[in-house]
Amino acid sequence: MVELRLHAFELGRCGTNAYVVAPPHGAGNECWIVDPGEDPHPLISFVRESTLEPVAILCTHAHADHIAGMDEVRSVLGPLPVHAHQLEHAWFEDPMLNLSQFIGEPVSVSSPTDTLVDQQSLELGSTQWKVLHTPGHSPGGVTLWCPLAKTALVGDTLFLDSIGRVDFPTSDPEAMRSTLHEVLMKLPDDTQVFPGHGPQTTIGRERRRNPFIVRGF
């Protein structure tokens, strides 16, 4: 099993999990920044004080609490490429689509430079990743899965004992059901799940105990 260097930061009023992900020690110092949410100063400070070299920002989806700090991160750490699913590229600049307009604090950040596609293969140092399209909470939600590290960054699709909301205007409960049962629950039980909010869990635990998976919704 590959041991990633994965550092989590709980950012902003929504307690959004942002991640800095790097290969194992000795396998390169390139890193990704995943979901840079509101008030990303702890993440920025960590990266600046480390030996890591950011090479890209990856977004699991484009709700405001997951993208609000992106321009600040890029202004300090460099004009990093930004990867997101095509279905949500327009959301980055549009407060109605990214839902920030509804709380009276509009968020508008730079549009992505690159597109994440279902089943796309990505490399980070010596590690191999696969992009899984996981819609439901939002149409362009993605999971970043590293099979050899038994690690999945799932955004707001799956939580410890819960799932992402499906009552937003752009959510789709039927798509969420398909994503949970036909994509995420097909991953190995020992896959470590790193969600967009709250503590980490595993696929096996959620398969057995998550009420939304066991009983449905």
Image (spheres, rainbow, N blue to C red):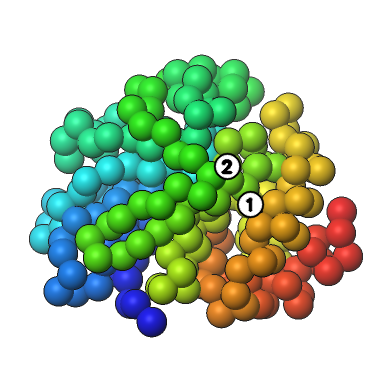
- Considering depth in this image, is 17 or 181 the residue closer to the camera? 181
The residue drawn where x is 61% and y is 68% is: 187
Q: Which residue is mark 2?
A: 141
The residue drawn where x is 63% and y is 23% is: 102
Quarter of the picture containing the N terminus is bottom left
Is 101 rendered above or below residue 117?
Answer: above
Helix, strand or loop status at disc 2:
loop
Helix, strand or loop status at disc 1:
loop
Image coordinates for residue 116, horizontal then vertical, percent = 45, 39
Amino acid type at mark 1 = Thr
Quarter of the picture containing the C terminus is bottom right
Compared across the picture, whether 101 is left or right of 153 comes to: right
Compared across the picture, whether 131 is left or right of 74 comes to: right
Image coordinates for residue 119, horizontal then vertical, percent = 51, 50
Q: Which residue is mark 1?
A: 157
Amino acid type at mark 2 = Gly
Compared across the picture, whether 25 is left or right of 187 comes to: left
Image coordinates for residue 45, horizontal then vertical, percent = 20, 51
The residue drawn where x is 50% and y is 35% is: 85
Image coordinates for residue 35, horizontal then vertical, percent = 42, 45
Query: Residue 20 got which mark?
Result: none
Where on the picture, by quarter, is residue 111? top left
